[in-house]
Structures are given as C-alpha cells and as structure tokens.
Image (tube, rainbow, N blue to C red):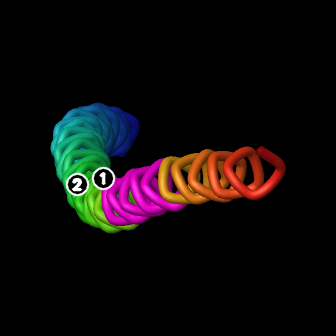
Amino acid sequence: MKKLMTKWLLKSERDTEEMNFKLNQVNQKINATEKVLDDLTNQELQKRIREEDRIETRKQEKETKEIEKKIKAARKEVGVLEIQHWIWEKIYVEEAKKKKKKRGKKKK
C-alpha cells in the first residue's frame, strides 16, 4: 500500500509540474499577445495623432494663405490710395500756383 501511495504521489507531483509548465507557456503566450496588442494600439494612436497633426497643419496653412491674400489686397488698396493722394496733392499744388499767379497779375 505504501508503494502504491508513493507511486500515486510521484505521479501527482509529475502531473503538477507538467501542468505548471504548460500554464507557464500559456502565460508567456498571453503576455506576448498583450505586448503585440499594446504595440498595435500605440501605433494606431500615433497614426491618428499624425493624421490629426496633418489636418491641423493644412487648416493653419489655409488660414495663413487667406490672411496673406487679405494683406496683399490691403496693400494694393493702400498703394492705390497713396497714388490717389499724391495725384490730389499735385493737383492742389498746381491749382494753388495758378491762383497765386492770378492774384499776382491782379495786383499789378
């Protein structure tokens, strides 16, 4: 009977070791799978972040172009106004000279 019990205990111990070994292998596979999933999740997040950055960059570039167009239009308008001012100033000076000449002729 002792021999039978000893055999049974040894077999049970071997079975336990074998089960622990298999359980360890399963845990290693689970850990490897979780790591792969984490890596894929991080890659997906980074991809989304890069895409959002690209979209934001395009949006900012578009806004910058619109502002540059407005600035260019404003500069043209200012240039036209400066030319108009210069022309009116020149006309005013010429008219003032004519009036001065007329006054000078009337006094003589």
The residue at which mark 2 appears reads as 54
Give the percent coordinates (x, y) of residue 45. 32, 56
Q: Main secondary structure of the magenta part?
A: helix
Give yes or no for contact between labels 2 and 1 (Cβ–Cβ under 8 Å). Answer: yes
Furthest-front residue in view? 108
Residue 67 seen anywhere in this rendered image of the structure: yes
User: Dot 1: few (<14), some (14–19), or many (≥20) neighbours within 10 Å?
Assistant: few
State the residue at coordinates (21%, 46%). Answer: 43
State the residue at coordinates (75%, 58%). Answer: 106
The answer to whether residue 46 is left or right of residue 71 is left
State the residue at coordinates (58%, 59%). Answer: 95
The residue at which mark 1 appears reads as 57
Give the percent coordinates (x, y) of residue 11. 22, 40
103 or 5, nearer to the observer: 103
72 or 13, nearer to the observer: 72
Furthest-right residue in view? 107
Q: How many marks?
A: 2
**In the figure, 45 relative to 1: above or below?**
below
Q: Is residue 81 magenta?
A: yes
Judging from the image, what secondary structure is the residue with disc 1 in?
helix
Quarter in which the C terminus is drawn: top right
The answer to whether residue 90 is left or right of residue 108 is left
Q: CA distance from mark 2 to mark 1?
A: 5 Å
User: Dot 2: few (<14), some (14–19), or many (≥20) neighbours within 10 Å?
Assistant: few
Numbered range of the magenta stretch:
71-88
Quarter in which the N terminus is drawn: top left
The answer to whether residue 49 is left or right of residue 87 is left
Judging from the image, what secondary structure is the residue with disc 2 in?
helix
Kind of residue at badge 1: Thr
